Amino acid sequence: MPITFNEEKRIFKIDSLDSTYAIGIFEQNFLVHLYYGKKIPDDNLLKLAYRGGFASISPNVAGCSDNEFSLDIQPMEYSCNGSGDFRLAALSIKDSGGHTTTDIRYIGHRIYNGKPKLDGLPSTYCNTDDEAQTLEIDTLDSFTGAKVTLYYTAFKNVSAITQSVKVENTGSEAFEIEKIASCCINLPSMNYNMINLSGVWSKERTVETRHLAHGIQSVASKRGSSSHNHNPFVALVDDCGSEDFGNAYGFNLVYSGNFAIDIETDYFECTRLVMGINPIDFTWVVEPGESFQSPEAVMVYSDCGTGKMSRTFHELYSENLIRGTWKKKKRPLLINSWEGSGFDFDDNTLVRYAKQAKQLGCELLVMDDGWFGYRNRDDSSLGDWYVNENKLKGGLKSVIERVNAEGMEFGIWYEPEMISPDSDLYRAHPDWCVHIEGRPISPARQQYVLDMTRKDVRDNIFGQMYDVLSKNHIAYVKWDYNRAICEAGSMQLDKAHGKEFFHRFILGTYELMDRITSAFPEILFESCSGGGGRFDPGMLYYMPQAWCSDNTDPIERLTIQFGTSMCYPASAMGAHVSASKRAGIKTKSAVAMAGTFGYELDPNEMSEEDKALVKTESEKFHKYYNVIHYGELYRLIAPTDDEFKCAWSYVAKNKTEALVTVIIKNNTPHRFLHIRLKGLDPDKMYRDNDTDEIYSGALLMNAGFNFTDGGLEMGDSIVKYFTQA
Ligand code: DGJ
């Protein structure tokens, strides 16, 4: 049983494959965190929460018989604001009198097989009910009537637990939620390194590591989306831990809007992590009888460093987050028009692309930005989702038929949440964009944002998209989102609900995505946000892949893709070979093959030599597809750890094949490139498919393999394929 309740000791134990998470019900029905880490068999856990000897300055709980019990020092399972716990609060509710003291106590619980869906929000799911168990713990703040239910789901096949929180108003007066975290984690030490993925446009998700310090350290977004700058992911790793050793805890929020992950180390040198919707620019009014659902937090535990943590995330997201037709279906080898042609194309350009790309092994042509309204630059037409017949002569149907006749499928670009001031939609509905009455609207990329909190707006965009997608044979949609939100306001939200805007915006986006993707289950959707500005598990729930970055330089991509691989699988990482000059086709392909793989260049501009190379690489995409997309990632040398090289491998789950890639980042004087492999079966024999030499898994993992026999230069790469002999 993954989840048990010990009636006598009043302890919940939540076991996933290899981890245990434990909570105790203490005096006066406070929920106290007991343990999170490697699986343990014990029930005698109450002492784990003991923190005696606190100063008299810390408040006691009124009426509590245990003088040593103070909320100021206990590892509270779901910490509340204002009632004596002065560290990070997970929950703060403002009552009708304007007070924000919040105090929740256990009132009951349920344990059952399976996992419930979250109302209006993306979340992980069970394929069958016996894959996971769920615990719902009900608590009550008897002063406001806030019934706060904590949801925990433990997966049996992976060391992953999810958490979310629902607040229901069972009282007689409205209250306001000022802060609601999706999880609150307490660890009894501060000897951890914090890993987060920071970045900027064109350099997203770079791994950053720091030792926890006293005080609060955080990553967050206030941009309206998860952002290029911070990903809703953090790992805490033993300070002596690494890629392969030590305890590693990974936390990821299934949410695409404003988020905050705060980590506080306290006066006992313990750590608390609180992750959820960013409380800045957020409140939610809950009327009697209404409820509010938080997004879902995913927590992964690994006893073997960040490598195993990432593999667990990949497995969970591939099996229990990504959905639909394309969950396991082989993705097409696509070519996208953006980097090759920008806005400057017509029907004949696209047909030329298709004809040439087909010969190179491509299967799908994506017509990127610029096909609609009268858009020839980025200054018009967003919101006018009908074809520009001056560009695509004969209309969309005709160009699709011509592309299909070349043996290629057709894909299309949208930016559904945006509106250009120079558009028919804006002229007809100037109140439909995000704005505050009387204030100027700040443009970004010459565009405004559509007010996705409004149903009429969503209905209009749904209708326009439905019209195009239902009348044409379209196999793929790229869903872009190219700016941050400011002057956040909606004409339909009154004063009391103004600060609900950002969360309502993302709920509206999710609703639209749900409607479109459900209406067209056969279409492959790829999310995008000016490159990788919305690469998060919320998006992956609706769309199985996301464009990783507008930076397609293969050397710079290494850092971006390595960071992305911390929690997102290769099948989700949009990666293309472009015309960038820093390396040849072979190396660019090797890097793009660590993701979905495709091309982003004008195939008619390529030399004959490059065309021949592209053909070979396209064949490799098919050959290696299974080991990359269904195998397991072992990071061998991180690009940030080594000046000269970077290496990784994909190993089939049954250990019968492995694909190893080494990229040379800088000119190197080395004539010797010995790398120890990982993840193989030491008892199996493996054939080097280039030389037919046979080695044991034990040798390859312990002695290593020499990947070069000569000089290597920046931009070179070596790809080795080993199969069981
Ligand atoms: C940003 C995306 O990241 C690019 O790939 C491209 O689709 C442009 N938008 C188009 O405007």
Image (tube, rainbow, N blue to C red):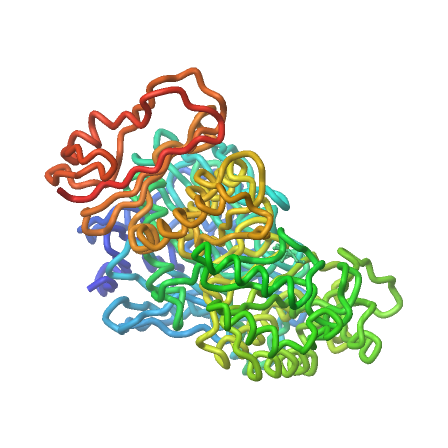
Is residue 424 placed above or below 277 in the rendered structure?
Answer: below
- Residue 425: quarter of image: bottom right
Residue 34 visible in this rendered orientation of the protein: no
Which one is nearer the viewer's eye here, 325 or 568? 325
**Which residue is most to the right?**
438
Residue 531, given in percent of the width and then of the height, sits at 59, 52
**Which residue is most to the top?**
669
Instruction: Say left or right for 28 vs 547.
Output: left
Which one is nearer the viewer's eye here, 161 or 197? 197
Instruction: Say left or right for 340 vs 104.
Output: right
Residue 528 visible in this rendered orientation of the protein: yes
Count of numbered tags: 0
- Residue pictured at 31% horizontal, 22% vertical: 709
- Residue 190: quarter of image: top left
Which one is nearer the viewer's eye here, 689 or 467? 689
Is residue 388 placed above or below 211 in the rendered structure?
Answer: below
- Residue pictured at 20% horizontal, 28% vertical: 702
**Which residue is most to the front?**
608
Instruction: Say left or right for 569 vs 212.
Output: left
Ligand 1 is located in which of the four quadrants?
A: bottom right
- Residue pictured at 43% horizontal, 28% vertical: 645
Residue 354, given in percent of the width and then of the height, sits at 54, 63
Quarter in which the C terminus is drawn? top left
Quarter in which the N terminus is drawn? bottom left
- Residue pictured at 21% horizontal, 48% vertical: 40
Residue 615, given in percent of the width and then of the height, sits at 42, 50
Residue 63, given in percent of the width and then of the height, sits at 44, 59
- Residue 154: quarter of image: bottom left
